[in-house]
Image (cartoon, helix red, strand yellow):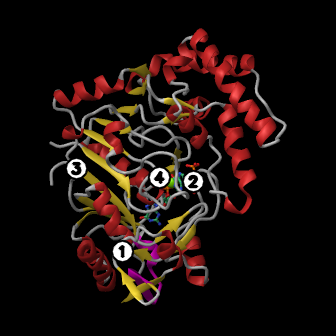
Amino acid sequence: MPNVVVVGLQWGDEGKGKVVDIYTQFADLVVRFQGGSNAGHTIIVDDVKTVLHLLPSGILHQNKICVIGSGVTVDPDILWQEIEAVKQSGHLSDESLLRISYEAAVISRYHKALDDASEQSMGERKIGTTKRGIGPSYEERVARRGIRIKDLLSRKTLEEKLRHNLKYANFLLKEYYQVSDTFSVEDELDYLCEFGKKLKPFMEDTSLLVYSEIKRGRNVLFEGAQGTMLDLDYGTYPFVTSSNTIAGAASTGTGVGPGMIERVLGIVKAYTTRVGMGPFPTELEDEVGQRLRDVGKEYGATTGRPRRCGWLDAVLLRYALRLNGVTNLALTKLDVLTGLPKIKICTGYKYQGKIYDEYPYSETVFNNSEPVYEELAGWSEPIGEIRDFDELPAAAKRYVRRIEDLAGIKFSFVSVGPKRGDSLVLRNPFRE
Ligand code: GDP
Ligand code: IMO
Ligand code: MG
């Protein structure tokens, strides 16, 4: 059986947590490959809601190896809280099932202070980050000054790195951003070494682990965070996150060669949402948008911020299918559209009389174009209890089929509610 990467095809929050939780039943390992605690992946099982920021969404299953890969940036404080919370609720009874890459990046308190200060200094031009320190931590990594998880085991190495990094960070905080809080090497050293002791039993050469497991015939589900339009290179730059979110990052973010990853399951929400700043052509700033927010409970799982809502954008969908090499598709939150008399899908952008049906490289075109819509009939029947695709209202089926036509791929999965059971599993991406 092949290995599968799960990615979001929009601006995040497509329901990756729920979909990964469902498909974990067919996998032996679940591996996060990028992002950090900016992610918030929600899983609802037996009315108990779990929001995961760093732990892979396979963690609620027994006997699955959950891996935090080298491409992830780990806030040890948040990770530790999460480990304790899942243990409290009766999971992860076998600690050896959680493995953290020695090479994963680390977020300390000064990264979060830098994130906050940077956002504040930008005023109108701010990105609207989650302020979890993601950008500053990845910046350090790219600058080849980064702290890695394995460094938490050596007070000496850590001290050297902190001495160097804090000189720079404190200068920025004090002189450039002119905020008062700076950080002492001693304090950060004690803080991180404490987590080093706690996390030591979980650390491993995870590239070797995942490779060896694949060689033994085990199946891997690679779990992405954020979404394609937040990708550092291919998203709506500069309003993006600081990592590559597309499927290719599953390879670099785990140390597993691309030849070992065969399938890509892309998740698309039945409409579009976005948290933070940046362009969003199909955004609805009217009562329909508010309704999507209310019914879909579109408030950030990490920051609680209201999500901006709008119609499905098929231009972005096709762009995302291409960038990720999507082989399988999942649709989520179809139930949220119930009760809308008309549903729109954006099929192109109009700018200065010209229609664009591919994602335009020009920011001017993308930021100032008008969406071209096609309109479909809505349905009024609640669909949350339906478990057989054929029983969906005819208009709901037409909407789903229309997206399949535009994407050129049939859905493997349709989600009709937030709970684990509110799911129509049509195909298993590990098989077809
Ligand atoms: P992720 O970041 O991609 O894992 O998605 P989030 O967890 O941030 O946001 C998805 C939200 O939608 C969560 O609150 C889920 O519980 C919820 N959800 C997922 N699938 C469905 C669905 O089919 N219907 C409804 N109504 N809610 C869903
Ligand atoms: P999941 O995995 C939605 C957004 C932020 C901001 C931009 C940069 O739950 O889908 P960052 O803190 O990463 O520097 O913020 O990216 N963002 C997300 N939006 N879902 C997420 O994760 C996100 N992670 C980051 O809102 O616009
Ligand atoms: Mg989320």
User: How many residues crowd mark 4 within 10 Å: few (<14), some (14–19), many (20+)?
Assistant: many
Three-letter amino acid code at the position of disc 2: Ala
Q: CA distance from mark 4 to mark 2?
A: 12 Å
| Residue pictured at 44% horizontal, 56% vertical | 227
**Residue highlighted by disc 4:** 226
Q: Is residue 205 above or below residue 307?
A: above
| Chain-order first, disc 4 or disc 3 | 4
Which corner quadrant of the image does residue 401 belong to? Answer: bottom left
Q: Is mark 4 within 8 Å of ligand 2?
A: yes
The Cα atoms of the two marked residues, 4 and 1, are separated by: 19 Å
Determine which of the numbered discs, if any, sits on residue 263 in the image. Answer: 3
Q: Nearer the viewer, residue 226 or 398?
A: 226
Q: Which residue has dot 2 on it? A: 301
The residue carrying mark 1 is 314
- CB contact under 8 Å: marks 3 and 2: no
Q: Which residues are magenta?
A: 334-350
**The C terminus, quarter of image:** bottom left
Q: Nearer the viewer, residue 396 or 2?
A: 2
**Magenta span includes 335:** yes
| Residue displayed at 77% across by 41% down | 176
